[in-house]
Amino acid sequence: MGPLDTIVNDEALALATPVAAFLQETGACPDDTTAHMGAAGAQLVGYAIPAATGPCAHAMARAVAVGFVIDIDDHEDQAPDSEESLHRLIRRATRFTTIIDAPETGRDDPNPWTRAWAHAVHDLRACAQPAPWQRARDGIRAYALACVQEASFRRTTRLPSLADYLTFRYALASGRWMVGLAEIAGGLDLSPEEMGSPLVRAAEETALTAAFLDNELLSRAKERASGEYDSGFIPVLLAQPQPRTLHDAIDTTTSVRDQIMELHLRVSAAIHTHCGPRIHQYTDALGHLSAGITAFSRNTLRYTSSEPHDKPPLLSGPTPPHRPCPSPTLPQIERWARLVT
């Protein structure tokens, strides 16, 4: 089994029904969506976090499912431009981060999604070492801030800048939270020095960013069908002064994704040469996480589409674009490349 293969976690996949029951008991989502959201939580953990077992797998699947239910930015699509919706988003983001810092404060909250989130993260915290839990908490805070940032873009009819896009996407897609879950599931308690290595940070960012670009390509049909505000890489490319067709933008996105995945492979090889076995284990977990997120994106009902052209071939290694397409110069890619040059 290679480090960029999906390892299916059957124990986690089997949690769809109990996670749906949890969502129903807490009132976190309507009865007609509990099965779908329960399956989504179990599937993401089942595809992306093979090391999650026992109470840890259950806690993660519940936390991920509740995250889908209360997805901060998705809640804003009902009235995206109103001042009241902005106030609701800020209150929701504040409560979301408060609960992860102190889950016990939300377990009796009158709001059902707050109660569900509090119960889920309380159980997840019990599975984690203090340092990985702190890193996962920081990831939730980064996600909440990115949701507020996206709300600002939406209300001013703007998009993220091309230069800042990959950093924005990593935060908005909960990249730091997801790598925290992988660390927790692996029972790792890596030191600040190990986790602070530029190579390790680059391994995290390249693994997850490649998967998030896969997710963007796969979710295009959902965004288009619902008319949602789309702050994705394709709209950002189309907004650039250099003329691009939609097909060009899709090809460029695929090309950038492939560049990032190639850099991940090079960063991982450097880590295996220069770092110790615990970091090797963590880096391998990042590869499985990346491949699993892509597998989840392809298989989840959230992005199911009857339009086959919306689903490009997605593999765990670099894939050639449909036709030669120049890639933009992005500062994050240049930074990662300098580490392995």
Image (cartoon, rainbow, N blue to C red):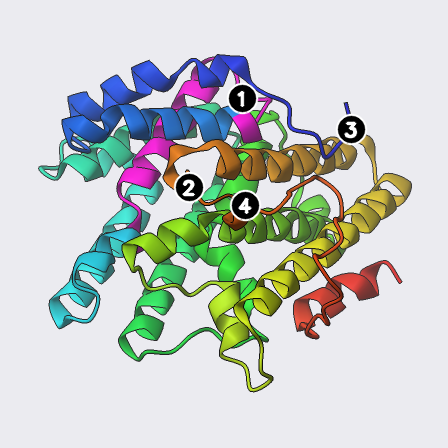
Highlighted magenta segment, given as a residue range: 47-73
Q: Residue at x 23, y 61 (%)?
A: 90
Query: Label 4 near label 2: C-beta < 8 Å?
Result: yes
**Foreground mark, 2 or 3?**
2
Give the alpha-carbon distance from disc 2 to disc 1, as whole Å: 29 Å
Q: Which quarter of the image is occupied by the N terminus?
A: top right
Q: Amino acid at mark 1?
A: Ala
First along the sequence among labels 1 and 4:
1
**Foreground mark, 2 or 1?**
2
> Is 152 displayed left or right of 286 in the figure?
left
Mark 3: secondary structure: loop
First along the sequence among labels 3 and 1:
3
Badge number at residue 311: 4
Give the alpha-carbon distance from disc 2 to disc 3, as whole Å: 29 Å
Asked whether residue 61 is drawn in magenta, I would say yes
Residue annotated with mark 1: 52
Residue annotated with mark 2: 305
First along the sequence among labels 2 and 1:
1
Q: Residues within 10 Å of mark 1 (few under 14, many from 20)?
A: many
Up/down of 294 relative to 231, above or below: above
Q: Residue at x 67, y 67 (%)?
A: 332
Estimate the x, y position of residue 131 in percent, counting from the top left. 55, 39
Relative depth, front residue between 330 and 133? 330
